[in-house]
Image (cartoon, coloured by chain):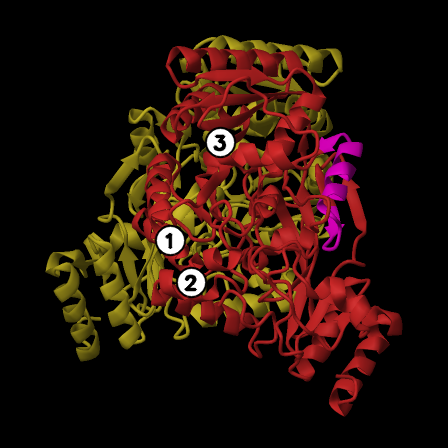
Chain colours: A yellow, B red
Amino acid sequence: MAEDPDSARLLARLAAIVGERNVLTDPAEQARYLEEWRGLYHGLTPAVIRPATADEVAAVLKVASETRTPVVPQSGNTGLVGGQVPDESGHELVVSLDRLDRIRAIDVEGGTMTVEAGTVLQRVQEAAEEAGLFFPLSLGSQGSCRIGGNISSNAGGTGVLSYGNTRSLVLGLEVALPSGELWNGLRALHKDNSGYDLKQLFIGAEGTLGIVTAAVLKLFAKPRGRSVAFVGLSAPRQALGLFQLARERTGSLLTGFELIGRTGLEFAVRHLPGARDPLAEAHSWYVLLEISSGRSEADAQELMEAVLSAAFQDGLLADATIASSGEQQAAFWELRHGLSEVQKHEGASVKHDVSVAVHLIPEFIERALAAVTATVPGCRPVPFGHMGDGNIHFNISQPVGAAPGGFMARAGALNDAVHGIIADLGGSIAAEHGIGRSKRELLRRVRAPLELDLMRRVKAAIDPLGIMNPGRVI
Amino acid sequence: MAEDPDSARLLARLAAIVGERNVLTDPAEQARYLEEWRGLYHGLTPAVIRPATADEVAAVLKVASETRTPVVPQSGNTGLVGGQVPDESGHELVVSLDRLDRIRAIDVEGGTMTVEAGTVLQRVQEAAEEAGLFFPLSLGSQGSCRIGGNISSNAGGTGVLSYGNTRSLVLGLEVALPSGELWNGLRALHKDNSGYDLKQLFIGAEGTLGIVTAAVLKLFAKPRGRSVAFVGLSAPRQALGLFQLARERTGSLLTGFELIGRTGLEFAVRHLPGARDPLAEAHSWYVLLEISSGRSEADAQELMEAVLSAAFQDGLLADATIASSGEQQAAFWELRHGLSEVQKHEGASVKHDVSVAVHLIPEFIERALAAVTATVPGCRPVPFGHMGDGNIHFNISQPVGAAPGGFMARAGALNDAVHGIIADLGGSIAAEHGIGRSKRELLRRVRAPLELDLMRRVKAAIDPLGIMNPGRVI
């Protein structure tokens, strides 16, 4: 690309902003920015630009705007829908936020943290903890995903049940707009109705309206005690009853309710180093249940015992074990967090990130299991996820011994089967991973023309030149 | 107006949609829609239109759009910033939602309610309760405000501490757009990242982008027990310490933390029928503290006693009493809810609805008290409000015996004094009541040109003809 004089001029202008060594043109240096971690998307770029400050991000966008250069913002490169990887055209500039990783301030009294977009989620969690507070966003990829990407994708994760999606954890934003202007909306207010709530535009917009450069996050009082149980049961309908019982008895103290199918557990036990089945006998379904207490560990345990004993009496579970140490709690959670990754050891897989109203989960799972096994006999469905949020990752691994290519050729049919049921139940085909590139066509099929039109109008209003992450979302 | 042939034609078209008797042109019938309850805003309108269905609302907007007729949506007409009353031009059509008041569905298993915009908030609360669930939005005006207005103003109220603003209580929306199209976004999903979250545009937009016709609301498990205490203390700084202690010990079980100054309590005791001071001696400041438990009344009481006793030992309170019955709990809350209304018995008043980061509340109050008493010697500040949300209603009653007109002539100077401190502390001049007509000029002074420009771009994208509540907000 650098041989093209326009391109050379562009890169020189960008180098003047971020410094020569932060304009990566060497294929070896670019590699980790151009490949998505599962290997599903590969792209090309004239350069990966690594600004170190919000002002540099804004200046880069100003140049992009003046030269009509499309920009792909990239945070931790852990996204699952191809939104953060450039396309194959070689025209899209990658703007990486990985150097923009300062924690600007922690306000212990006010319970807020001001943090730059490139900060790794786990560092945010740890910094909150060091300050005696708690940041509840928690994902499988927390060791490498970065908070800007979490915000731009309105990440969900395992804390949503009690604390909400990322959207509800953000008090203020700083955003570099496509025009090159930097919007400072870093307010730390719990209530502010002074005009339109502009930050809502950028949360979950997947980098199509601007680049989030920093945020004010809400921190919470750290629960003083937790109890984590692993429950075996026979069907999702039992799990729904258990959820309702637990929710009624514990309210917002119910901080985790994850459903896991037997196949997923088997995969995890087989492929995660040191993993073992927490229960003596096999069950068709499992629930990982977490209760947190603001009082004490003993209080959380007591509540957990009361919930499990009431559930047992009501016939809502077959067996259960409560983690007896922090290590065991972590081990239970690792089984759950590892579920997405272990599938790769079992051959090709087709994944769905869907949601329905919580009480429709059993019906959805029953119908989807029937539909996918009819579509590809012998396939191994691995449904799991945040049942308490109505969000299931309805993943499907290939039949044992089948050719991966042959299975993947049926991906479209499997998608149609699952998404058809979702449409029928009024659900979402993109519950927490977003649209990116992989679901853009699907979005056009499932959302009403009026909704797509409204989205396009918002896009045109904020990014009139269409340089921000084009071809993603809308 | 009806003598103008254009106007007559317009009203005939509207009558064809909603029926002759729902196009109010008689001044006596119009009166209650044209006057704001405090008498601060009076307007004129060619007609008050009362559609009964969402389709009728959309059809009315289509006609308004075709004829470029400005529209003022009106819900319960309890707004405090003049957003819901037409101006004096006589050109603005009032579209009242008061006939659109059906509860379309309550889903007990899923914990949601689908309700039309004109439903009175208290009816929403009661319907939730009858279904064994709980809708936490609670305001002084709940007997007359309507849920569409609550959503359009992103209402706050006393439940925000634990449950969030109205924004976080809404899962889905149905909105009549200025074009006359009806957007059905009535999803009941806790997680949905399939494209831009369009409902966020309309929540808090004060009717400037469209008319909310229905919503899917989140319902919660009803707390099994509550404890309400009335605490006397010497200064807001003590109250902040008490808040932090209570928050740390009770987390999300802390469902109310309201600060009240002595003058406000005196006004309430003097003017609210049957009201009495809950404490034996006078204190400079009070806190109404509410703790809710998912377990039992006794559990809530026990937690409250533990909090109060620790606070007493730490020197964070002077005296406290815990309500001994449901009636007494209600009486404590009535003192708080009545504070805004009782001021009218004490002559003219100037009001501010401001927020800062929670830990800055003591500094704000100290500085604002000094500033306003320096501006109008003898004035009686009545600060009170949702301290736990950082939101204070910094109201000021006129000096005893002064001429109301003379005091109101100083309103601008008082506003400047209070808002100057808010700007200095990074706060908001419109924490929960919105902008409407009364704060539009102020908004232009306090928000950055870039923010105002973004708001105008959003407005132009969704309401290109500018017919929706023009002259409000932006």
Q: Are the residues at dot 2 and dot 1 in contact (C-beta closer than 8 Å)? A: yes
Residue kind at label 3, given as amino acid type: Arg
Q: Which residue is mark 1?
A: B419
Q: Which residue is mark 2?
A: B442
- Kindly state the secondary structure of the residue where label 2 is placed: helix
Q: Nearer the viewer, residue A101 or B145?
A: B145
1 vs 3, front mark: 3
Q: Are marks 1 and 3 on the same chain?
A: yes
For image coordinates 44% across by 26% down, the residue present is B243
The range drawn in magenta is: B114-133
Q: N-terminal of the two: label 1 or label 3?
A: 3
Q: Nearer the viewer, residue B22 or A205?
A: B22
For image coordinates 74% across by 34% down, the residue present is B109
Q: Nearer the viewer, residue B340 or B81?
A: B340
Give how far apart the Cα atoms at labels 2 and 1 are.
9 Å
Residue kind at label 2, given as amino acid type: Leu
Give how far apart the Cα atoms at labels 2 and 3 are.
30 Å
Picture disc at residue B262? 3
Which quarter of the rendered picture does the N terminus of chain B lie within? bottom right
> Exactly how many numbered labels are in the figure?
3
Q: Position of residue A230 (x, y in %)?
A: 56, 18
